[in-house]
Image (tube, rainbow, N blue to C red):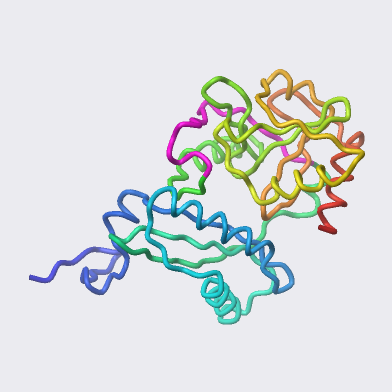
Amino acid sequence: MMNYIISNDKFISSDEFKLNIEDGLLYGYGVFETILLKDKKLIYLKEHYKRLIKAVEKIKINMELSFEKLSFYLNLYIQKNSLENSVLRVTILKNCDSFDMLITHREDKYKASKYREGFKMEISEFKRNPHSILSGIKSVNYLENIYALREAKKIGSDEVLFLDCKNYISEGATSNIFFIKDGVVHTPTKECGLLKGIIREKIIEIIDENRDLRLKQGFFSLKKLLEADEVFLTNSVMGIMPVSKIDHTVYDLKKYRITDLLIEELSRY
């Protein structure tokens, strides 16, 4: 007997609907990567692929997808959609003993004016759990992130800050966080339940190669963050974004010497 599902307002046979409903869609069993397309060039594609491989291995998705094949599909997608500057998303969903891949795109919404203004952040009531299997991967289980972010945007903020279970700072909904105090760059350790972002890793490399810069990774309290001289966020789409406000604490972007230096260094990296 033929089985049917309803997708929006259409009846579709279960054979025709190619995605596995139970794993990928009903249970959110999957991961994704978000890749910047700039001037028809995919930025840090190899780094995204390596992180994707680690994620599917961690949650045991049997994905046979070479870097060359992924690159082929992405470039074909870019060509078919006549894209030059965009944000591409590769989603991998578990399908029994195999996988389904979705490629989609959206507009890059970060404007130059926002970098001049800086991001405003709210502190989320939700906590990052470093012991969760979802810790450190870009899981399609993004409800907590999106819910918290949308609530923050309702009151005029741009991003949220998550603390971990011990109230150390962890990350944003879509970003990693850095802060500078007395000339030293600080960022939470991965043991705080954060995603090791592509740009986060590039910033760490830049600092390691610069004798005039110092980096400290560790467990940092919210109080220490709020007392910082400079704060910035990173992700693969926006690069480095200065932070002008966290909760009720305001930062002076005109004094952001090290943040500006890192923005300049990253542009050449």
Going 86% across and 31% down the picture, which residue do you hit? 252
Could you say which quadrant of the image residue 24 lies in? Answer: bottom left
246 lies left or right of 68: right
Of all residues, the one furthest to the left in this rendering is 1
Q: Eyeballing the image, is 249 above or below 15?
A: above
Give how far across and how far down residue 88 sits, in percent: 58, 64
Q: Quadrant of the N terminus?
A: bottom left
Q: Nearer the viewer, residue 38 or 5?
A: 38
| Image point (71%, 35%), residue name | 120
Tell me if residue 237 comes above or below residue 195 in the rendering: below
Residue 66 shown in magenta: no
Which residue does the image show at 46% across and 48% down from the upper left?
139
Q: Residue 106's quadrant in the figure?
A: bottom right
Q: Position of residue 131 (x, y in %)?
A: 46, 31
Residue at image location 60% in from the left, 44% down from the top: 174
* Residue 7 in picture, x, y percent from top left: 30, 64
In this view, the residue in front, 113 or 92, is 92
Quadrant position of the C terminus in the picture: bottom right
Up the image or down, 260 lies above or below 48; here it is above
Q: Position of residue 147 (x, y in %)?
A: 49, 39
Which residues fall within the magenta stretch? 118-136
